[in-house]
Image (tube, rainbow, N blue to C red):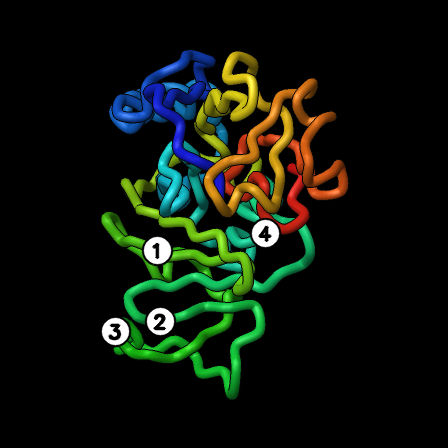
Amino acid sequence: MPKSAKPTSQGKCLLCQQVFPKAAITRHLAACRTTAYAKDMAKAKEQTVFHIVVEAKYLPEYWLHVDVAGKVTLADLDLFLKDIWLECCGHLSMFTIAGCQYSAEPEGAFFELADDCFGAEQEQSMDIAIEKVVQPKTKIGYEYDFGSTTELTLRVVAEQTMQFKGKAIRLLVRNEAPALMCDNCKTTKATKVCSQCIDEGEGWLCAKCAKKHSCGDDVLLPVVNSPRTGVCAYCG
């Protein structure tokens, strides 16, 4: 897996185009979202919207803030996460919410979500609306690829009834790419990573050093802004 970056993580708000430290972005979005939506969506239909923070479980320098309409299904959110961060070879994935597991292909018979599902150990389909399974402060686990697994954590920051149109899942902020330096020369930013050496916490290479790497070109992958960097065949 990618090694952690030392500098403070930052991200650009896509509503106002300003850059903020990770620790300050949630507070900023509370005001910026209200202003932006009131200005641009005066004629939009009011609906329930969830502000959700997404973070790589073991690599917190990779993070997103998104607004998700309440009618969006977990399956829709799954596709969004795969598209922006994860998809490489069609691996399976799963959400875990309050003890319930939600997958695209649940094992055994599918049971409709009951009022007492929370806390029960049973597998459900992802074809269920977000608003039926989350509320503010809900924490969600997510796994992609049950071989070389990438784990994410999702946290519901707020639930609001607001004027909301356009994409049902809207990216608000994405982390700026961590600055990962070449493990060989120590002076140049890495553009490649060795999928074999990464298991030892190294293998980050600049373009020049990558040409001399002993493992060969076949195992080198591009360095991309994703917690999936260097894993499986992920190229961004």
Residue 53 on image: x %, y %? 36, 40
Reading the image, the residue beneath label 2 is 100
Residue 208 on image: x %, y %? 69, 18
Q: Element type at marker 2? A: strand
Looking at marks 3 and 1 on the same chain, the residue that comes earlier in the sequence is marked by 3
Q: Is residue 54 among what the camera can see?
A: no
Looking at marks 1 and 2 on the same chain, the residue that comes earlier in the sequence is marked by 2
What amino acid is at disc 4?
A: Leu
Reading the image, the residue beneath label 3 is 119
Q: What is the crowding at mark 2: few (fewer than 14 residues within 10 Å), some, or many (at least 20)?
A: some
Compared across the picture, whether 63 is left or right of 81 comes to: left
Residue furthest bottom in the image: 109
Q: What is the crowding at mark 1: few (fewer than 14 residues within 10 Å), some, or many (at least 20)?
A: some
Circles 3 and 2 in contact, beta carbons < 8 Å? no
User: Which of these two is toward me, 85 or 71?
Assistant: 85
Cα–Cα span, label 1 and label 2? 10 Å
Looking at marks 3 and 2 on the same chain, the residue that comes earlier in the sequence is marked by 2
Q: Element type at marker 4? A: helix
Circles 3 and 1 in contact, beta carbons < 8 Å? no
Compared across the picture, whether 192 is left or right of 49 comes to: right
Relative to residue 44, is residue 156 depicted above or below?
below
What residue is shown at x 39% (from left), y 75% (from top)?
113
Quadrant in the picture for residue 205: top right
What amino acid is at disc 3?
A: Gly
Q: Is residue 36 among what the camera can see?
A: yes
Q: What's the mark number on residue 196?
A: none
Looking at marks 2 and 4 on the same chain, the residue that comes earlier in the sequence is marked by 4
Reading the image, the residue beneath label 1 is 140
Q: What's the mark number on residue 79?
A: 4
What amino acid is at disc 2?
A: Cys
What residue is shown at x 55% (from left), y 63% (from top)?
147
Relative to residue 114, is residue 167 depicted above or below?
above
